[in-house]
Image: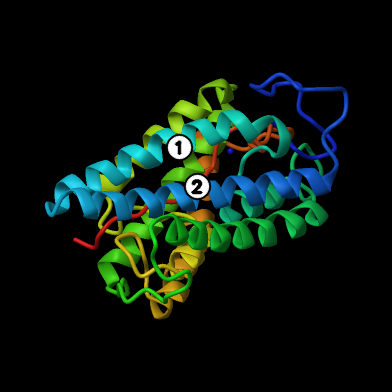
Amino acid sequence: MTATTAGPETAPESSIPAAGPRPAPLARRAAAEFVGTAALVAVVIGSGIQATELSKDIGVQLLANSLATVFGLGVLILLLGPVSGAHFNPVVTLAEWWTTRHGGTGVTLREAAAYVPAQVGGAIGGAILADAMFAEPLVKWSTHDRSAGHLLLGEAVATAGLVLLIFGLARTDSLRFAPVAVASYIGAAYWFTSSTSFANPAVTIGRAFSDTFAGIAPGSVPGFVGVQLAGGVLGLALVAAVFGRRAADPQPSMPASSPAMAASTPGATR
């Protein structure tokens, strides 16, 4: 850290015009998830490295990092949403599968099984690419410990809010606003969460491969991933509490994630 349904049952409510009468083959959709997640992580880590080279002020560094991520995420959602739905985030993919596992539009278990490894592989590739662009060691485990309890709470809040936003947009037929809304949420979450809102297991894993501004120590990864998954469950519970349950909801295999979201954001522990 999303909304044009990428599965075989493309929703007519999709906010992005379909390129054709049928969805792209699963291999192409998985490739889009790989490329999108790789590009997102490259933006997150690369802008973090650039920021630390341009300024010693931690606030300026975080501002530059967050702005680059917001713009990069919005562009990636618009570009790849029509192909794969632009999830870029296992939490979004799994949440969509869970809500439609008994029928309805959204990713199937087979599609989720293709998306998640593509997202994780893309995140690792994006981290290596960012390191290469800035002449950093291609793989150097991060030493940024992020295991404190308040950071884990921040991750749970960030991820729950992301899922609430994405699925709430689907419930209110507002997915056309997803690129702006999701990118804006991620930008805000950089600043209002203690963890700077990674909110994405794939991006969390990828960022462990870079010992730079946006990195996370491998020992901190399991805790982050665990609370991100818990945050996803909480987010779905909030969707049901706020918007109620409907038998046939349009699903956010959309132009946003996320992770990113989507989403998936970096920054220094504060």
* Residue 173 position (above or below residue 71): above
**Mark nearer the N terminus (2 vs 1):** 2
State the image quarter where residue 10 is shown.
top right
The residue nearer to you, when weighing 89 against 214, is 214
Q: Position of residue 40 (x, y in %)?
A: 50, 47
Q: Is residue 114 left or right of residue 230?
A: right
Q: Amino acid at mark 2?
A: Leu
Q: Amino acid at mark 1?
A: Gly
Q: Quadrant of the C terminus?
A: bottom left
Residue at (30, 50) in percent of width and height: 50
Residue at (32, 37) in percent of width and height: 67
- Extreme residue in the left direction: 57
For label 1, the SS is: helix
State the image quarter where residue 146 is shown.
bottom left
Q: Which mark is residue 40?
A: 2
Q: Position of residue 136 (x, y in %)?
A: 39, 66
Residue at (55, 22) in percent of width and height: 174
Q: Which residue is mark 1?
A: 72
Q: Position of residue 243 (x, y in %)?
A: 53, 33
Residue 1 visible to an observer of this rendering: yes
